[in-house]
Amino acid sequence: MPDTTLETQLIELEKFERKFFDLGKQMFEPGKVYLYPLDLLATAVMDRGLSLIYGFTSQIRANNFTCAAPLVRMHLDNVLRFYAAYISDDCHGFTMKVFEGSHIRNLKDKDGNKMTDKYLVDKLSKEHSWMTEVYEKTSGYVHLSNTHIYNSSRLKDFKERTIAFSISKQDRWLTVEEKLEATNCMLEISQILFDYLSGWNLTKRQTKVEAK
């Protein structure tokens, strides 16, 4: 039987679909708001975010953490990218450069620093202390690493020096607690992203649309 606590959190995570839909309606309400270049980036991170959320929940329920874990890193990437627009000297110019193909790691913030992943993670970690650890840990799932070796084998008997191996499309040794931790990370990341998007929505709605 599935763990009820884990399933409860997965359902909570999926509620961001409605949150992003409702926010999107406000951001593009006809006759109420102007459209800005940053709206392109906002739409992209919401669209990508929902795809990642549903990919994550489906793979967790399928007991396939190998596929689910990299999605945490990709979702964190959404936050980093939108945050980069916030700390640039011109968020709309920043968006257009990204739209034209510029790599964010080569763009500079308002203080003149290149916005590499490490730089963005370090800055955000001042507000969210867990972010550096999550970034480093989930990055280990993107490329083949010792994490994958650990998840596919276990020392069975130290004295006999026997090892158990697993070649499967499902997790054998991953605990519910580890899956719950990853799910809670997805919830935290989704909320941070939603907060930044909501901030942008409030900013743009302060400009009154002139009647034609």
Image (spheres, rainbow, N blue to C red):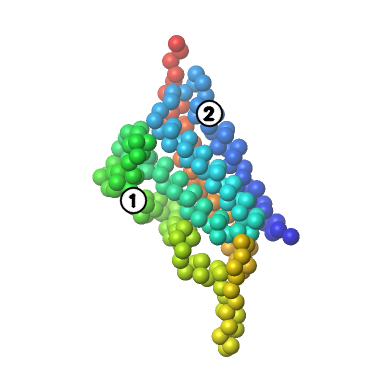
Question: Identity of the amino acid at label 1?
Answer: Thr
Q: Going by the image, does 102 lie left or right of 144?
A: left
Q: Which residue is mark 2?
A: 26
Which residue is drawn at the image coordinates 37% and 36% (left, top)?
Answer: 99
Which residue is drawn at the image coordinates 47% and 53% (left, top)?
Answer: 73
Question: Identity of the amino acid at label 2?
Answer: Gln
Circle 2: is it few (<14), some (14-19), or many (20+) Cα within 10 Å? some
Q: Is residue 47 above or below residue 62?
A: above
Q: Residue furthest bottom?
A: 159
Viewport quadrant of the N terminus: bottom right
* Residue 141 placement (x, y as % from top left): 49, 60
Please tell me which residue lies in front, 170 or 15. 170
* Residue 119 placement (x, y as % from top left): 34, 52
Which residue is drawn at the image coordinates 55% and 37% (left, top)?
Answer: 20
What is the distance, in whole Å, between disc 2 and disc 1 at their CAs? 31 Å
Q: Which mark is residue 116?
A: 1
Which residue is drawn at the image coordinates 40% and 28% (left, top)?
Answer: 36
Q: Residue furthest front?
A: 167
Q: Residue furthest left?
A: 112
Dot 2 and dot 1 residues touching (CB under 8 Å): no
